[in-house]
Amino acid sequence: MRNAVVKVNGAAMSTVLGQGQARIPTGGKIRAGIKVLTRRAAENPKAQEIYEHCLAAGQSFEQIETALSAALPALKTPLVPKNVPWFTARGQDFPNPGIAQQILERYAEYRGDGVKRLYRFPLVFPSDMWQAVMPHELASWGLSEKRFWSQYSPDGRVRHCMCYAPVPRDDTGKRAIRVFGGRKAALRGENGGMCDPERCREYQQRQCNLSGRFIFFIPGVRSISAFELHTTSFYAMSAAIQKFETIAFLRGGRLSGFLDAKRTPFYLTKKLMDVPHIDEDGRAMRVPQWIIDLQAPIDVRSSCATTMMRKP
């Protein structure tokens, strides 16, 4: 970040931390699905015991996977994602575990199977820019950090492939120079620094994938930080962008806050869709999946009227 500007008594002043992309602090995750034991792990009574115990304790799926790997090192990947029609809010995914319980008590519901689950919940967005409340990128991850990621040029016309620049060294070449502001980013050397999935080795080997997240507040749940919901669904994010743009048009550019004077929020839920899929042999097929669905239950007429009233 460089050359940040703040307003003081109408004058612009530079700051040492610099100007960077707006980031909304988050403090807790709602999950789009669950993870279950692989077929091999499910055949192991010890794995079943650990999994059930950790679930009951409200641990995150990362913690459950760590516990399973520590107790049963022969199980390299003990958990696998499962697409389900509900969201999960687990205590260890929040700095304050009680927040997860607040969310479930307010918005979880029964739908015929005797288990209370989070199928739908309200939310408001903290920014009018959909790029800020649904940031997304193509990214390739290593064991401990992001290796490559997509980033657009300032004019939004060119998509680059970025990586971390090598740490600079002093004149002797033996000592790393202390870098201010964290590691620097640089264009990746391959493909001329362009992000081109069809020519990208990592993307073709499924090591680089689209990932994004919704950033929001939940009415009635007290938190100074926003919550986030991660997704890798191209269809969910594309549909959300269309709704963001429609709502912004109807509300004179506004996405943040409640949708109308009646304090109507957005909602997140899921719907079952037949999603196009290309198999390894290049054949097109459709598979049913539960896809995140952003809803905005407002009266279009009242929204248009409110927008017209705001115009000079």
Image: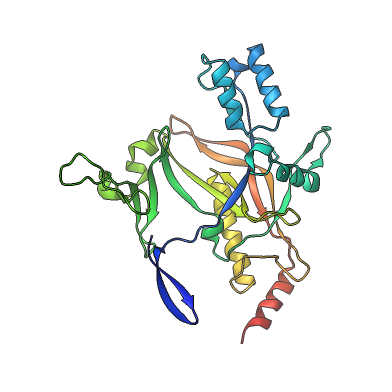
How far across and down, in percent of the image, does residue 233 sit?
Answer: 55, 44
User: Relative to 276, does residue 180 appear above or below in the rendering?
Assistant: below
User: Image check: 25 left or right of 190?
Assistant: right
In the rendered image, which quarter contains the N terminus? bottom left
Q: Quadrant of residue 176?
A: top left
User: Image check: 152 left or right of 311?
Assistant: left
Q: Residue at x 66, y 32 (%)?
A: 59
Name the residue nearer the viewer: 151 or 60: 60
Which residue ends up furthest to the left in the rendered image?
A: 172
Is residue 290 visible to us here? no
Q: How many marks?
A: 0
Which residue ends up furthest to the bottom in the rendered image?
A: 312
How far across and down, in percent of the image, does residue 131 sit?
Answer: 51, 59
Q: Residue at x 39, y 33 (%)?
A: 205
User: Relative to 216, does residue 289 appear above or below in the rendering?
Assistant: above
Q: Residue at x 61, y 60 (%)?
A: 243
Question: What color scheme is it?
Answer: rainbow
In the rendered image, which quarter contains the C terminus? bottom right
Is residue 168 visible to us here? yes
Q: Quadrant of residue 21?
A: bottom left
Q: Quadrant of residue 31?
A: top right
How far across and down, in percent of the image, does residue 15 sit?
Answer: 40, 67
Name the residue nearer the viewer: 16 or 100: 16
User: Relative to 288, does residue 27 appear above or below in the rendering?
Assistant: below
Name the residue nearer the viewer: 180 or 257: 180
User: Image check: 63 left or right of 267?
Assistant: left
